[in-house]
Amino acid sequence: MFKSPGKPRIVVLGLSLELYKRVLPGYMERLEEQLGRFVGELSPHVGIVARRLCYLPEHVVRGLGEAEQAGADAVLLVPVSYTASGMSLAALLKTSLPLVVWNTQEAATLSPAYNFDDLLMNHVTQGTQDLTCTLLRNGRAFGMESGHYRDQAAIERLVEWLQAARAARFARGLRVGLLGHPFDHMYDFAVDEARMVEKWGPLTVRLDLSRFVELAQKADGDDVRISMARDREVFDVGRELPEAMHVQSARLEWAMRRLVEESNLDALTINFMDIIKDGRCETLPFLGINKLMLEGLGYAGEGDIMTAAHYGQMRRLCGMANFTEMFTLDYAENRMLMMHMQECNPAMARRDRPIRLVRKDFWAPGIQPYVGMYFTLEPGPVTLTCMTTNGDGDFFYLAYETRILDCPPLENLDVPHWLVELDEPVGDFLTRYGLAGGMHHLVAAPGHIANLLGKLAHLQGFDFRKL
């Protein structure tokens, strides 16, 4: 249902100076060839939509037009000689596309034989500084990486900027559905929706609970049977799971899928209390929610549109994410139990154990048992992230790099859950997290990606803190 993020799609604009075109015959042709060598080193990591050498303002205008028409994720600006910022500034300030500056050159060292031609082909730093100084002065956010064009570590950092640019652009059109209302009195994830659109980008789409009920009641029987058959192929479906219960959960899954498709959603949040109070749904749609997360839908519980949108952009940033909370703490072993009611991304499950589908009785009255999942997560590095707002309503990120513990699921806790193990006293971390204003809802991403998230924050103009 949801496309893989794939490689960032970029337009490359090499920047030079019109004076050089007039006084140095053949120089632009040489710069064009050099730009091609630079881009060649980068091309395995990105999709090159177009490449253009610019030494006149109209060249930049055309290049940006190509980028916007093609729906590029970012514009990569590569000074290939000195370039005066006035040549490109006006057009760069008009475009809404993310900008990343690559400060590189062909020479890796200064040799004793260095001459004027070497200077001509390797003098980009002054022009880069002219450009970045002027962009900053005009309040235009941009990313930047410096290093030799064959330095793989520098290229990896540059690609991170382009991945962050892709996520920032994606957030500008992200649609997050809200089924029900935000949970009463959970003020930590309260957000000004108009400010969220203006400063960040995600748009809230209010979903009709009556429409969800209608879809569930008329769920397509063939699709339901196909979904159940697929469940039996992919998951461990025990005989103790009643067939009627599986049908019921599969019908809600079908309805949830149609609702997501109808509203063209990138992320979703539901308030289970509103579904229970409404009384027309026999059970809760957690099976469908987990399967939609597996396929790439962003999600958060309890009507938390901000975290759901953050999950959506995190998936675009690094390919995979998960919704979670910190539950019971292990002060003796410096561990934390991570989970929610049922919602957890099966894409992050341990690969050496099947995911079990189990009968789940809900802890609050008024709802019938539903099909739930039982698994824990693949061990390894993980980053816990939180997006929230300060007293002025400005968005900011917190991030903490830790690791998922290698352990089987707890035998007596038959919901998706996982443990993180810290290299410090768990209380010390939680104190820092609380003093920094962290919410009780988090998004987790595999790997240690705090630096990548910091680049996204920079491009969006948000504060970022690595705990």
Image (cartoon, rainbow, N blue to C red):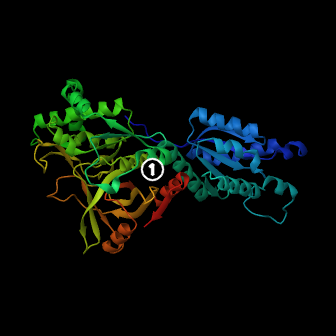
* Viewer-side residue, 438 vs 62: 438
Looking at the picture, which amino acid does disc 1 mark?
Cys
Residue at horizontal 54 percent and vertical 54 percent from the top: 461
Asked if residue 151 is positioned above or below residue 177 in the image, the reply reads: below
Residue shown at 56% from the left, 46% from the top? 45
Taking depth in this image into account, of 354 and 76 the one nearest to the observer is 76
> Is residue 438 positioned above or below 272 on the image?
below
| Residue 172: x %, y % from top left | 49, 42
Q: Is residue 449 above or below residue 10?
A: below
Q: Can residue 167 be seen in this view?
A: no
The residue beneath circle 1 is: 318
Does residue 80 appear to the left or right of 251 in the view shown? right
Q: In this view, does 208 lie to the left or right of 103?
A: left
Residue 266 horizontal/vertical position (percent) = 39, 39
Q: In the picture provided, is 95 more to the left or to the right than 106?
A: left
Crowd around label 1: few <14 · some 14–19 · many ≥20 (10 Å): many
Q: Quadrant of residue 458?
A: bottom right
User: Quadrant of the image for the N terminus?
Assistant: top left
Does residue 97 appear left or right of residue 284 in this picture? right
Q: How many labels does the image show?
A: 1
Farthest residue in the right direction?
23
| Front residue of this view, candidates 443 and 151 | 443
Front one among 446 and 365: 365
Residue 189 makes an appearance in the image: yes
Q: Where is residue 116 in the image (x, y as percent from the top left)?
A: 87, 57
Which SS class for mark 1? helix
**Residue 292 % position (x, y):** 31, 40
Q: Quadrant of the C terminus?
A: bottom left
